[in-house]
Amino acid sequence: MPTIVGSSAGPEPPFPLRMEGKVIHGYGRGSKELGIPTANLPVDTNLTPWIADIASGVYFGWASLRLSELSLSSPPTSLDTASHSGFSLYPMVMSIMANKFYENTERSAEVHVLHEFEEDFYGAELRVLLTGFIREGRGDYANKEELIADIKLDCDIALKSLDREAWALRELGRGTLDGSWLVR
């Protein structure tokens, strides 16, 4: 698998894609079983029609969270940014699929924000800007450790892919990608 995905010129159609909503409770496995917390968004084809047709798999891009009441546990990474209009920007990976490893039958939208937070943020407003596709979803993992290794690889690929000027947000002051919707 390549360590960087997507054209050096930036996102190509159908990207970027937008999704937003309040963070909801998922299956409770991300943090507890895998050590990889996820912020789950409702899968609503009325609000996000493209989600019905998009391939199941792992995507990457940018997330914005309105966390005015929450404190952050660690300083921002080089790809994080200060707050805009109450929103903070972060790189992210996102799984859109029915997780076959756990034998789920319904698709979920699970965002792993690439930042450590002190506490959960259920109910917070979350917006995501999907910029690219990393890989198709798998269900044939021999164990959780194999799944965790793939997720960590996805995170590395996302960070390296986003760390190019054409993939960085103008709102971070160093890129060309328009992420203004994330912080409005």
Image (spheres, grey):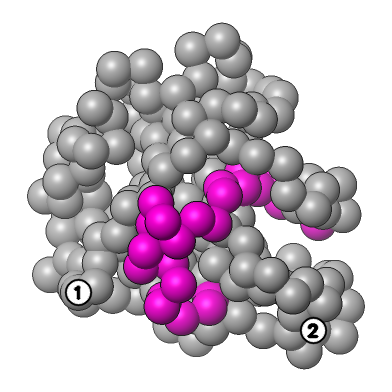
Q: Is residue 145 visible?
A: yes
- The amino acid marked with disc number 1 is Pro
Q: Which residue is labeled 1 in the image?
A: 13
Q: Residues within 10 Å of mark 1 (few under 14, many from 20)?
A: few
Q: Quadrant of the C terminus?
A: top left
Position of 165 compared to 59: left or right? left
Q: Residue drawn 74% across and 84% down?
A: 139
Query: Marks 2/1: CA distance?
Result: 31 Å
Residue 175 falls within the magenta-colored stretch: no
Q: Secondary structure at mark 1?
A: loop
Position of 103 compared to 122: left or right? right
Vertically, is 23 above or below 118?
A: below
Of residues 120 and 82, which is closer to you in this image? Answer: 120
Q: Secondary structure at mark 2?
A: loop
Vertically, is 78 above or below 2?
A: above
Position of 156 compared to 182: left or right? right
Q: Residue drawn 28% across and 75% down?
A: 6
Q: Nearer the viewer, mark 2 or mark 1?
A: 1
What label sits on residue 58 in the rendered view?
A: none
**Magenta residues, start to end:** 34-57
Q: Position of residue 35 (x, y in %)?
A: 79, 50
Q: Residue drawn 37% across and 64% down?
A: 49
- The amino acid marked with disc number 2 is Tyr
**Image quadrant of residue 87?**
top left
Q: Which residue is labeled 2 in the image?
A: 141
Please state the total of marks drawn on the protein image: 2
Residue 36 falls within the magenta-colored stretch: yes
Of residues 158 and 96, which is closer to you in this image? Answer: 96
